[in-house]
Image (cartoon, rainbow, N blue to C red):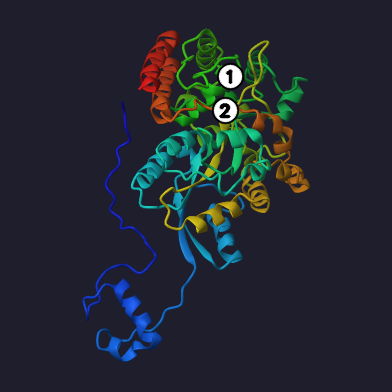
Amino acid sequence: MHKTAVPPSTEPDKDHSINDSSDSHSQIPRRDFIKRTSLALAGSAAASSMLLPTRRAVAAGPTEITFASAKFFGKQTIADIAESYNKAQDKVRVMYKELPPPSSSTEVHQQLVQQLARRNGEPDVFTQDIIWIAEFADAKWALPLDEYFNSDAMKDYFPGMVQACTWQGKLTALPWFVDSGMLYYRKDLLADLNARAPETWDELIDAAKQLTSSGKSKLGFLWQAKQAEVLVCDLVSFIGSNGGSILEPDGKTVRIAEEPAVEAVQLMHDLIRKYKVSPEDVLSWDEEPSRRPFTGGDAVFLRNWSYVWKVAQNESESSVANKVGVAPLPHFPGKKSAAALGGYQYGVNAHSKNREAAIDFVRWMSSPETQLQFALQLGLCPTRPSVLADPKVGQEQPFMRQLKDVFVGAIPRPVTPKYPQVTLVLQSQISRALTTGEVKAELAAAKAKIQTIVAA
């Protein structure tokens, strides 16, 4: 079984109390020094002065905690918002550690695993992809939060997000934002066909063919098939849109080789090879390479995350501003649209030496006021219904309201503490299926490998 190698720590524990190193004059530990100095101030100055030199008292400063997060940006950055917390109070100071962006999900995961596995309390607070919650909780790296956030407090969040942040009956993460895959489309080009946003994959293929063959658009449908986490996200959407699944909720029953999944992966292959509405480039694309041709005006359709909306409407970054619509992803005939549940959530290190300060920080970061700031400044959909209903969100981020049902009803990727191993199998076998066309064989191989992983 594959395990992520964790190198030994090369960084000392950052215990912000005075350490136990010896004083250069007396060779007496500093903790004893502090105790004896206190006695001296109480009335034993003469006796104490024979043992230790006089030291000047130092005023206590704010408690310092570390916060590690994947890189998100918009009008503001995560660092900007963390600094807002620092300025709002003087008891806690947050030191921000930037991790790679979510498009480099594997690297973000590796860095967090390496840090949390040291069990030295750093980072005190971290943001985690929703797919890592079970893994981090099962490893006892994430602090259970139930004693800090009771059931009444959690009623202020979407129930599905609370469920996603819960592992084996314990709340081990606090909701930050929700995301899901969605379909971006060119309103002006579909208007030329007197067509609406496609509801089925057949409708998407037909519209893409008409607009590319007529020369009105260079490219049809852009998505992400790079051998990376985003491929699994797309896979979940395609399979879900045919009523299928990868892994049952019991975490043991593997469905990846059954007919709904086979048909869905065959469609993914055929979009490129048979229908030719998706360029072969999608095989090497993740989010940003697929986004650029669309906002550059070269494509009709794009599957991507919610962040694209702000970019598409920004005239300095997009040549299709005010021409873009957004809709649920298409589905197979007689089935329902499906979107992979995404989003990052907050975690508190179970070994944090500054637990109360960490809790205060995540409470502030997940508050209605801060969630509203994230929605308006970074385009991240809030996990609190009250914030999503705020008039400012409706004005500046209308797509969030439009796709509320998609966000709250999105399908999770396989829920298992073995997810890191499962996703590597899926990425490899699905990539091979799309390249070779041997869909049934590759899915059968994926099933066999995943069954071995989840049974261990």
Residue at horizontal 47 percent and vertical 22 percent from the top? 251
Comparing 104 with 128, the one in front is 128
Residue 212 visible in rendering: yes
Residue 49 in the image: state x and y as whole percent: 29, 88
Q: Quadrant of residue 354?
A: bottom left
Residue 296 visible in rendering: no
Residue 177 vertical placement versus 225 (above, below): below
Residue bearing mark 2? 340
Residue at horizontal 56 percent and vertical 34 percent from the top? 164
Residue 307 vertical placement versus 77 (above, below): above
Quadrant for the N terminus in the image: top left
Residue bearing mark 1? 240
Residue type at the position of mark 2: Ala
Q: CA distance from mark 2 to mark 1?
A: 9 Å
Dot 2 crowding, Cα within 10 Å, few <14, some 14–19, many 20+ = many
Residue 192 in the image: state x and y as whole percent: 75, 23
Quadrant for the C terminus in the image: top left
Contact (CB < 8 A) between labels 2 and 1?
yes
Q: First in sequence, mark 2 or 1: give its number.
A: 1
Comparing 267 with 402, the one in front is 402
User: For residue 283, which numbered disc appears in the image?
Assistant: none
